[in-house]
Image (tube, helix red, strand yellow):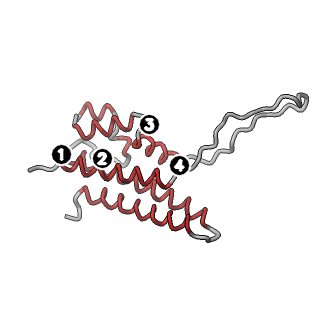
Amino acid sequence: MAHELYTRTNQKIFYAGLALESWRKAEQGQSMNALALIQAEREAALFHLYGALLGLCHEIAGYYRLPDSAAPRAERFLTAEVLEAAPSQELGELVELAQSPDSWVAQLLSAYAELFQPPQASKKAKVDPGTPLITAVSLDEEVAPLARDTLEAWRQQLKALAQRFRETLSEW
């Protein structure tokens, strides 16, 4: 029973919850490395949420016996081509969420991908010393790091989605 596909999804959702709880404690703490702890827990929670999404994809792929059901990346499941090859309601919903830029799944995938990008310095407008009356204004917005509440909402949505999918995937 410990080798059932759903156990990995549940485990990752639980680990994300632990990381979010540690993040909350780090925010309340007064330690000198609180900012580093918060960033570490943010990344850990994001890592585990992505793993839970991948686990859910594995559950669906295993149930429908999709080819390449052990793919190591969630994005490989969340394409129109995979859906066309093996249509299912659950996979269709996930693909739709992944392709909608405002959805929590698309935002989760984007945030996870950003973990692997090198840091980039903010862009600064060049100032011409010959024109002191003209002020250069940067329209680049600083991207705020993901909030704990956002990741907790994603965790709850993923948990609810997994439970709902399991009801339809179970054989009676």
Whether residue 122 appears in this view of the structure is: yes
Disc 1 versus disc 3: distance between alpha carbons?
A: 26 Å
Question: Identity of the amino acid at label 1?
Answer: Thr
Q: Position of residue 134 (x, y in %)?
A: 84, 28
Residue at the (35%, 58%) spot, across then down: 13
Q: Residues within 10 Å of mark 2 (few under 14, many from 20)?
A: many
Q: Position of residue 34 (x, y in %)?
A: 60, 66
Q: Residues within 10 Å of mark 1 (few under 14, many from 20)?
A: few
User: Of the numbered discs in the image, which one, if any, rests on residue 168?
Assistant: 1
User: Of the numbered discs in the image, which one, if any, rests on residue 116?
Assistant: 4
Disc 4 versus disc 3: distance between alpha carbons?
A: 21 Å
Residue with the mark numbered 3: 102
**Disc on the earlier residue, 4 or 3:** 3
User: Of the numbered discs in the image, which one, if any, rests on residue 110?
Assistant: none
**Disc on the earlier residue, 1 or 3:** 3
Residue at the (25%, 52%) spot, across then down: 163
Helix, strand, or loop for circle 1?
A: helix
